Amino acid sequence: MTIAKPKTSATKGKWSNKALVVGGGVAGMQAALDIADQNYKVYLLEKSSSIGGRMAMIDKTFPTLDCSACILTPRLSEVQRHPNIEMLTYSEVEEVLGSAGNFKVKVKRKARYVDEEKCNGCGDCVPACPIEVPNEFDQGIGFRKAIYIPFPQATPNIHTIDKRGHAPCYTNCPAHVNPQGFTALMRSGDNDKALKLVRDAIPFPGSLGRVCPALCEEKCERASVDDPVSIRNLHRWLYDNEREHGGYKGDIPVIDKKEKVAVIGAGPAGIACAEKLIRLGYPVTVFEKREEAGGLLRYGIPEHRLPRDVIADEIKIVEDLGVKIEYGKEISSVKSLLNKGFKAVFLGTGAPVSSKLRIKGEDSTGVYHAVDFLDKVNRGEKVPLGYNVAVIGGGNAAIDAARVAKRLGVKQVTIIYRRSRAEMPAIHQEIEDAVEEGIELKVLTNPVEAIESKGRLVGITCIEMKLGEPDDSGRRRPIPIPGSEFSIPFENMIIAIGQRADPKGPHAELDMTEWGTPEVDPVTLQTSMENVFAGGDLATGPGLVVEAVGQGNVAAESIHRYLQGEELKEGRPETFIEVIPEDIKKQRFGVHPRASMPKISIYNRRTTFKEVETGFDAETAMTEAGRCLNCTVCSECMECVEACQREAIDHNQQDEIIELDVGAIVMSTGYKLFDVAEYPRLGYETQSNVITAMEYERLINAAGPTAGHLVRLSDGKVPKSIGFIQCVGARDVGKGVPACSRVCCMYGIKNAVMAKEHDPDVDVTVYYADIRAFGKGFEEFFEMAKTRFGVKFVRGRVAEVVETDDEKSLIRVEDTEDLTFMQNEHDLVVLSGGIQPSLGMRILAEDVGIELDNDGYVKVEHPLLYPVDADVDGIYTCGCSDGPKDIPDSVAAGSAAAMRATIVLARGGEVK
Amino acid sequence: MTEAETGTDTAAEAPRIGVFVCMCGHNIAGTVDVEAVAKMAETLPYVAFSTTTMFMCADSGQQLIKDSIKEHSLNRVVVASCSPRMHEPTFRRVVEEADVNRYLFDQVNLREHVSWCHMRQPEEATEKAKDLVRMSVARAALLESLPVKSVEVEPTALIVGGGVTGMRAALDIGDRGFNAILVEREKKLGGQIAKLASVYPTGEQGNTLADQLIKRVKTHDKIEVMTESTVTDLDGYIGNFDVTVTTNDADKTHRVGTIIVATGIQPFKPHGYYSYGDHPDIITLAELEEMRLKGDVLRPSNGKPPKTIAYIGCVASRESGVKGHEHCSRVCCTAIAKSAGELKDNADEIIILYEDLRTYGKGHEEIQREARTKHVIYSKFPPEKKPRPEIVDGELVLHWHDVFSDDNLILKPDLLVLASAMVPPEGSEDVSKVFSLTRSPDGFFNPEHVKLAPLTTHTAGVMIAGGAQAAKGAAESITDASGAAAKAVGLMARGEVEIEATVSRVIPELCSSCHTCISACPYNAIAMDESQDPPVALVTEAKCHGCGTCAAACPSSAIMMLHSTDDQILAMVEAYLCAPMEPDGGAA
């Protein structure tokens, strides 16, 4: 034991007379105030978005039954107004170096995406936000928005956006549609805004809503609960719904820029690029060599998947925005366009040339290529087909061709694919639909020769395949089985094994790759000519429509930057921080299966080109939208930006590291509540009428989720009998919590009394081990609970809580005073959980450089003589940092820590 | 109010009122027609300027107020915005920066009181807003500038009580660079702790602990120690107390700025409980500790070491309905466990009879567990059937009922130790009178607020720490001590304390010297000014909290509340009841 006080370390150099208080609960606030009152500057650091700590969550305080918020609020204001206190909320300590008088503290100020200077807490943003998540402040039983203040008296009264990176659906979409955002807007009933958000990414919510393979859904986190959200069908519904109700309602952009832009090719890439540019105010002309726009969407995808009027309508919307499309106009030279005054050109001419099988007999009559075949059909041209048709390939074009052939009346359509069904790149639903329609799949089979007779196809010789090691695509490589050749009669063969760009297009003027595509910068899509950009299938080879759209978007951004003289590459490619799956809150989502898509009858499917999938009805769409987990909480729908009149919202804010020089540090990091689920026998989590005391606090609080109505969460009924179980996670060596938590007895009694205050007829029993009513006025309060309020007390540790058939909770306990075994039924059971060191205390202690005691609390230098001094000079502790305390003891310790800290601050340079 | 009536006010500079109506985004403007409110305000008497803006609290809004004051020579400002809770200080500062006294500002709450609570009735809300603004303007016209007063704080603290609490407070204040006067009525410093053989949770000897503090206190150049002394009188107010300390019948007055009362606790002598006093081997826990401190534990009856020891807890504590003994004494459960655990090494059998086991603090459960490990026996007795010692032929026989076995048990202990209640020390009544401290039913002093202000009291500048507030242990008391020292230093470090100008004032001509106000004042802020003939009541402004009790009590209407004068309040009432006349006539 030492008594060599006052100690000051022999720090040389600068001596700071500022202090840092870590933790903005009631103890930390008190410490900050008492230091600041001595005219020293104090940084009050708080990891959440508001100071106030646990006390702000509590309904009433024992033993006086004061309203917690009412007595705390003036203190919050006092802290905020104090000229010597600087609040650093939403911040964390990263590192502490130095010693007493001269600490250097690195603090991470987490991005709250709201400018603290500009926000005045008016809350206009809150109703605009469509995202609702459980409110931590309400212990998850109430809700808050993604932009929020945790409670009405939050201090500072500045909103915070809870944003946890990017959603996997969003990052996986090549065009970056924001599913979380648009489903949230749907849920809040704003379908127009939802559709606008989809259109911010793609000009084809209807078309892509039908044909997209939905890479978003592949990564949807909902799949870990049940099935992915049907994202694609939801934006399809948005489009269909708009069309049903009068069509496009969005803005018409103002063309305010002079630089003319040309787009060659009115396919997905070209249209996407043109649409983006027109919205940016550029005059855009699209040159399309064919009679209609849409490219592959129009000529490659059959009508049963994408009705003509849908794609035509979506093209028309783009034209209505101001994009000029010149049809039947083939451009052979980019330079000629530039000479005509276009300042930039985008090339999106696609990959319309079909790849060959390179087998014998491939050119015989009766053999088609899928692109040409579908093109012809889509133009209404008649294509003669026989009885037996083979389709070679496993992609979407193959499935499309097969299903079209079926609809044209072919009796027997067989898809021949060299790998197994699982490896087929086509949309799986499409494969299923094809099989349903009677199309045969012949997998692990590869054609080796087209048998002809008099120049006409009569059959195909195939070879059986097996799967070997995975290749570059990650799929297992097909290997022919020698000697397994066999022949099947076919009158037609449709080859659907891929396409490539036409090497003779206008891009021939540019530097080319060995595959005959223009050389482009992968980030900017700039070609060898600085004002010419290329994207989509032309640049990448055959890909998905949504990939082409994504490239159109990228090219539009490049062209815009180019024309504005901006750096093309700055901040690109956009980096995404994907939300950590563990951070996604799923526990409150029950299983609710994905909506199934209604379809026309199988007869119609085999015989007509009617659209197979008929779309969701409004109710299904809404329910489906409700399945989104809101992975990242904020979805960046930008509604708040629009709602904020003070321009305070900045979605690009970044975390910031600041460095503080302080002379003394006060730790007031509070506590965490014991996780009562660690006692499965007490039924929390498995029984909905077993809740924690803190949940109960929010339940009886007038500002809480039920506006202070004490009801059961399971059925909203008013409980007529409540049991309070004490010492849950305290004084239990087995659970690693040997010590008494010091506050639970009193808050348990207080909660029992409050139950009686809410409803004098309610039957209330407290099950306890010992009643520890030791503080000023506590014993008197305990006495009052028994005598005046009629709260019953049973001494005994509860054995278990069991749910009865009539949804009551049966408490089994031995009354140790009567030595009787009791089984008491209650409508509601409240578990009074113990206190533990705050979350992250160990890491923080390491960062700060102090020692913890065996229980994980801050170790004090001497429990009697220096009860608020940590074991490092210049660092002090108060509140529950060094052990459980009630409010008055925490406040007193806050003042004490302030006193000790200011002795250090006052020495200012006078080092002995 | 007619124009003629208001126009009579010619003594002061004519009011020129500016009205600033805040939209608060949609918060107010979404419900209240703020333009209409501002337009209405323009028509009110003395209003020289009226406007609206999006956010009055924003920098731009603040600047607008300042610019308007200059441009329109405003000398009164009404801001109609939100609750004054948050922004009254903001706007007071704003007007002060534009050379308008802070008390010439008035705030109307159009948000919490109007738009938020009448969201669905925009028309009625607008009418209410107009009423409130009209009332505020009427009051503003009568507002008077008040001096912003402060008093200096003497950089010396008085600490009453020389136990560990008082000493820790004195040391912290001294180490921080301020003077401390430590007054102890006993000859020796150290208080109760110095009398303990083993202080939980560390088990150190109380006198060694105390000695460390005593040594430093005595040698500290900022600390003056006065033993065998008591504070007998107090005069003055926060920052400037004159304390009379009586040492051996000699009085000396000291000027101090702040006071910490650390008078501690005292173990109760439990006469009438468990045959205490009837047998020499029945002693209190405090007596046992003193015995241990002096030497070995021996039976007072025969001087032999006791082999069988029984402790009884909650002696004269937790007695519902017995004044001064209803509280839990907080320290006994752990103290018994510590004592029993230590004595068990030399005793055959130790049994602790308890009512409830309250080993709540850091390290307390371990102490209890250690005692049990040493086979100290715990036996719970029912509160309604307490243990009964019997003296049979000079021999001590203890009867009790054990709850857990439901058995009546008997033991013949060599020593019966009663853990008696911790009560306020003798003389607490005098202390409470000298420092105007109120006491709770347990007899200890009341803090300013039991939850959030446990160390300050209703007497500004007077703090309490440790046992003065309630029975508590050494660690908790020492924490309090540093905390109370922080409160004292906070006042002294600033050097002056601003006192609210919104206090009461006696109009001497009207005072009938009836003393009603003196007894009504909860803060002892009013006294008779004997220099006047006849003597009249006089308010010590530094002591006044502005609560208004005296003004309400005064039968002669001789007391006015500054900033809430009768005239100002009646003007508001009148403005509410008598809406301005319609422009096209109405009542003449």
Image: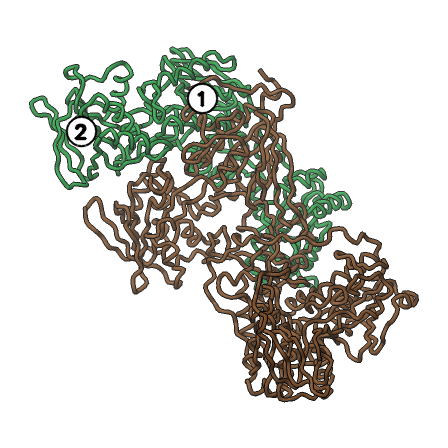
Chain colours: A brown, B green
Residue at the right extreme, as displayed: A339
Would residue A413 appear left or right of B217 to someone viewing this image?
right
Crowding at dot 1, Cα within 10 Å, few <14 / some 14-19 / many 20+, comes out as many
Q: Chain of mark 2?
A: B
Q: Could you tell me residue A60's position as x and y percent?
A: 42, 47
Q: Quadrant of residue A435?
A: bottom right
In this rendering, the answer to whether A490 lies above or below A273 is below
Q: Could you tell me residue B562's position as x and y percent?
A: 57, 38
Name the residue at 82% across, 76% down.
A289
| Residue topped by disc 1 | B168
Name the residue at 47% across, 24% down.
B259
Would residue A361 appear left or right of A688 to someone viewing this image?
right
- Dot 1 amino acid type: Arg
Does residue B3 appear anywhere in the picture?
A: no
Would residue A134 appear left or right of A497 to someone viewing this image?
left
Does residue A219 appear anywhere in the picture?
A: yes
Q: Chain of mark 1?
A: B
| Residue topped by disc 2 | B274
In this rendering, the answer to whether A232 lies above or below A831 is below
